[in-house]
Every structure is written in C-alpha cells, then in structure tokens.
C-alpha cells in the first residue's frame, strides 16, 4: 500500500474492523523510552481519522506488517509499525518524527 487517498481510506476501514490490539515487548520499551503513551497510540488506531500514509512492509510470523503515519500536530507526526494477523493487530514499535521527515518518508513511498 502507498499514500494514495484510496489506499489510506481503505486502511482506515481495516483498522476500524480490528478486534484486538496488543503490544509487543519492543513497543512497550520504546514507547516508555520515547515518552509516548500506549493509550494514545491505541486511540489513534481505533479512530484513524489522522492517518496520512500507509506503507506495506511485507509478511512475517506475526502477519502482514505496515508502517502507519498519523498527523499529531502541525510540526510532528506519529509513526507506528504494526502487524496484522486476522482480527488481531500487534503494535511493533512507535516513534515521533518531525514533519520534515514526513516529506522524505512520502518521497520514499513513491519509489
């Protein structure tokens, strides 16, 4: 998936249909280290109105892996890597990035 509006809208529907959201140990450690609240990330995933980009990262043991980019403030975004297996979403890692990085990320998605 890429950044096309149709792809993002389709993925918003997928997120809304998820039955269970879990967090990996790696996610727990990185979220705490980076001062990101787990509940805030879960809220973004359950109500994905601020989702602006989706990047498919392949298939692994935990299911299909995606990089999700959410607009948080005018100068910062939230990047969440998740894996989806059926109706279960596993939060793999999370970090905050500035909008300048978003522009590079979006350019990378176009490749």
Image: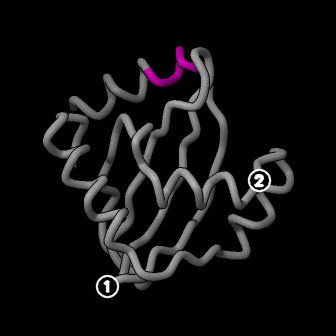
Q: Which residues are magenta?
A: 98-102
| Residue at mark 1 | 86
Q: Residue at x 67, y 52 (%)?
A: 40
* Dominant SS in magenta: helix
Q: In the rendered image of this protein, does residue 29 appear above or below residue 47?
A: below
Circle 2 Cα neighbour tier, 10 Å, few/some/many (<14 / 14–19 / ≥20): few
The residues bearing labels 2 and 1 have C-alpha atoms spaced at a distance of 25 Å
**Residue 31, x across and y down, in percent:** 76, 55
Q: Earlier in the sequence, mark 2 or mark 1?
A: 2
**Residue 47, x across and y down, in percent:** 46, 53
Mark 2 and mark 1 in contact? Answer it, CB < 8 Å: no
Which of 18 and 66 lies nearest the eye of the viewer? 18
Q: Kindly state the secondary structure of the residue where label 2 is placed.
A: loop
Residue 19 horizontal side relative to residue 44, left or right = left
User: Which label was assigned to residue 52?
Assistant: none
Q: Residue at x 31, y 85 (%)?
A: 86
């Amino acid at each position: 998936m890429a950044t096309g509006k149709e792809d993002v809208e389709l993925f918003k529907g997928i997120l809304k249909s998820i039955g269970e959201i879990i967090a990996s140990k790696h996610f727990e450690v990185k979220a705490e280290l980076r001062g990101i609240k787990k509940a805030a990330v879960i809220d973004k995933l359950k109500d994905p109105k601020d989702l602006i980009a989706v990047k498919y990262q392949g298939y692994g043991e935990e299911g299909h892996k995606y990089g999700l980019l959410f607009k948080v403030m005018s100068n910062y975004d939230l990047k969440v890597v998740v894996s989806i297996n059926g109706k279960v979403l596993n939060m793999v890692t999370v970090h905050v990035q500035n909008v300048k990085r978003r522009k590079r990320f979006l350019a990378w998605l176009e490749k």
